[in-house]
Amino acid sequence: MERRSCDRTSRRKWRVLCLHSFRGSAAALDAQLALARWREDYASECEFACVDAPHEASGQSAKEIETLCANSAGRFEWWNAREDANGAVEYDGLAEALRAIDSACATASARGEPFDGVMGFSQGATLAAIALASKEIGERFTFGVFVSGMVSRASATERFVWANVRAPTLHVIGVRDDVMPRTLSEGLFRAFANSPATLATHAGGHAVPRFDESGRPILRDFLDSLARAR
C-alpha cells in the first residue's frame, strides 16, 4: 500500500473519513459538523464521511450527544480504557476499531473514491492519530485533523513512533475545553514532531468549532496549505 500523493489534479474534493467521539455515533458527528457548518464552508473542497465505531456504547452518552441525536438509534465507542493489574493502560476494542477504519478505507477505494484524510473528534481524534501513526493503516491517508485529541495511553501503541509521521496534521484545541485538557491536546501536537503540524485554537470548549480565535474558518489555512502542496 502506497501513500497517495497530495496531487489532486484528477479530483475536485478531498475525501475525509470522520471518527466520532466516545459513546457517540456517525449521526452525532454529522450533526456536530452541521452546527460548525463544515459542510457548508468547505463544500467545494471536502467531502466528510462519518462512520460508526464497531462497539455499542457500554454506558451513558454525554448530554450533548443525547441532545443532538435524541431521535436516532445507536451510540458507539471505539474502545474502553482500563488499567491492568500492573498499571498499564489497555484500550479494549482498539484492534477492532483499527480494522473498522481499514475496512472503510478498502470499501471506499473499491468504489473508486478513496479517502485522502482522516479526521476525529475527542476519542475519535486519538484514534485518528493512532491510525495515521500505524504502519498498517497510515499510508492510506495524506493528512490528519485532530479535534480535542490526545496521545494514546494504550500499551498496544507504545511501539508507535509518532514523530515518524510525515503527513500534514492539524491539531484543533478549545481554550475552554473542560473535557479534554488543553495540555493533553498540546501533547499530541508536540508528539507529531516531524509532521508539518499546525495548531489551531478556538474560543469554545469541547466541540467541533467553526472559527479559530481570530475569526477565520478553522480549516481554512490548513486546507490552503494542502492546496499549495498539490
Image (cartoon, rainbow, N blue to C red):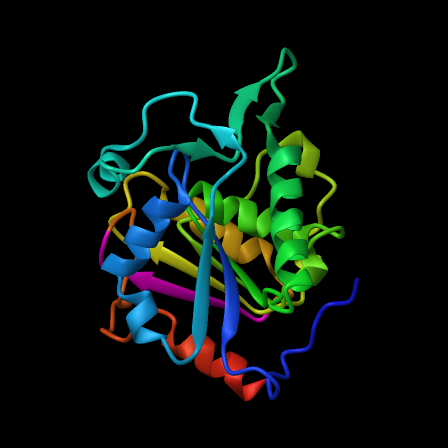
Residue 126 location in percent, x, y? Answer: 51, 45
Residue at the farthest top position: 85
Residue 70 location in percent, x, y? Answer: 22, 36
Taking the image as shown, residue 105 lies to the left or right of residue 21, namely: right
Any magenta on residue 23? no
**Magenta segment:** 196-204
- Marks counted in the figure total 0
Give whichever of 106, 207 is nearer the camera: 106
Residue 129 location in percent, x, y? Answer: 57, 51
Q: State whether residue 63 appears in this view.
A: yes
Q: Residue at x 70, y 53 (%)?
A: 137
Q: Check the image and report above or below for 71 versus 16.
A: above
Q: Residue at x 33, y 62 (%)?
A: 201
Residue at the farthest right position: 1
Give whichever of 32, 198 is nearer the camera: 32
Where on the picture, by quarter, is residue 92?
A: top right
Q: Residue at x 23, y 54 (%)?
A: 204
Q: Quadrant of the C terminus?
A: bottom right
Q: State whether residue 132 appears in this view.
A: no
Classified by dominant secondary structure, the portion drawn in magenta counts as strand
Taking the image as shown, residue 48 lies to the left or right of residue 218, namely: right
Taking the image as shown, residue 76 lies to the left or right of residue 158, namely: left
Q: Quadrant of the N terminus?
A: bottom right
Q: Check the image and report above or below for 26 versus 58.
A: below
Residue 79 location in percent, x, y? Answer: 53, 31
Q: Check the image and report above or below for 51 versus 87.
A: below
Residue at the farthest left position: 67
Q: Check the image and report above or below for 146 versus 44.
A: above
Where on the picture, by quarter, is residue 151?
A: top right
